[in-house]
Image (spheres, rainbow, N blue to C red):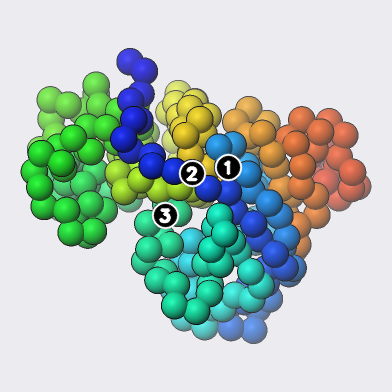
Amino acid sequence: MEPQKAGLIDRTTGIQAEDVHAWFDRLHALRGISMTIPERKVTAIIGPSGCGKSTFLRCLNRMHELVPGARVAGRILLGEEEIYGNGVDPVVIRRRVGMVFQKANPFPTMSIFDNAAAGLHLAGERNRRTLETVVEQSLRAAVLWDEVKDRLQKPGTSLSGGQQQRLCIARALAVSPEVLLMDEPASALDPASTLRIEELARDLAKDITIVIVTHNMQQAARVSELTGFFLDGELIEFGPTNELFTRPGDRRTEDYITGRFG
């Protein structure tokens, strides 16, 4: 069934990173990252382990600062708003910029329904009809509704790994984010589930800005329109995915893509 997203996504927004630096105490993890992430496209971030991919992703919705001793410098604009500006509420930013993690993390004590509605509950929504409507819409958007509609009161952890990840995507979508960050969302899944997550990312990009971190270059090539290559905390190259993979402008990008390192 075709996903139904009407009413879920109110608006979508691009992100502009300008000279972004990030630290973990004294460790300088990101060094001067500048890139424009356009709205309603899938942008992939690739690079070897420890290169700063996930750190950058967490800077985009102010999750990096939750780590003790972590800090960020530079500017990140969500639309026209500087997300690290004075008086900006990080909780609101994290609602506008949702995130799905490498390991599916449904709340273990909650039902499928309550997992999907968790963000709405935190935002103070109590109207049962509204909750039911948005939960159905978000589960449809995550291409999960037909699989779970008859067992919504079962635990979220009763689902398969791929279904749990789609439930987490539904949970993020329920609060109408403008951007969805996906941190290696399929790395722990089987090939069939991976394909469904990739198809879902491409479909969601019709209505929402998607940024996906992946260690799988074939996945980046399949799912994204733009790709950034990170190395040692720096953005080495950023551009259309086809060009970066077929005609990289930097020798380090070519070496990584061809498997010479990483």
Above or below residue 163? Residue 97 is below
Element at label 2:
loop
Q: Write the residue at 44% across / 77% down.
A: 87
Q: Write the residue at 67% across / 47% down.
A: 46
Name the disc covering residue 12, or none: 2
The answer for how far apart the CA atoms under marks 3 and 2 are is 9 Å
Tags 2 and 1 touching, CB below 8 Å = yes
Q: Amino acid at mark 2?
A: Thr
Does residue 104 appear in the picture of this structure?
Answer: no
Q: How many numbered tags mark residues here?
A: 3
**Residue 84 x, y percent position in the rendering:** 53, 72
Other-residue count near label 1 (Cα within 10 Å), few / some / many at <14 / 14–19 / ≥20: many
Q: Nearer the viewer, residue 92 or 33?
A: 92
Does residue 177 appear in the picture of this structure?
Answer: yes
Q: Which quadrant is the N terminus positioned in?
A: top left
User: Which comes before the other along the chain, label 2 or label 1?
Assistant: 2
User: Which comes before the other along the chain, label 3 or label 1?
Assistant: 1
Name the disc covering residue 96, or none: 3
Element at label 1:
loop
Judge from the rendering whether residue 182 lies leftward or rightward of residue 31; answer left or right.
Answer: left
Q: Amino acid at mark 1?
A: Glu
The answer for how far apart the CA atoms under marks 2 and 1 are is 6 Å
Tags 3 and 2 touching, CB below 8 Å = no
Q: Write the residue at 59% across / 53% down.
A: 15
Q: Write the residue at 38% across / 63% down.
A: 92
Q: Place residue 77 in its image quadrant.
A: bottom right
Judge from the rendering whether residue 199 lies leftward or rightward of residue 105; answer left or right.
Answer: right
**Residue 202 x, y percent position in the rendering:** 53, 29
Q: Which residue, given by chain and number where applicable, does mark 1 sit on?
A: 39
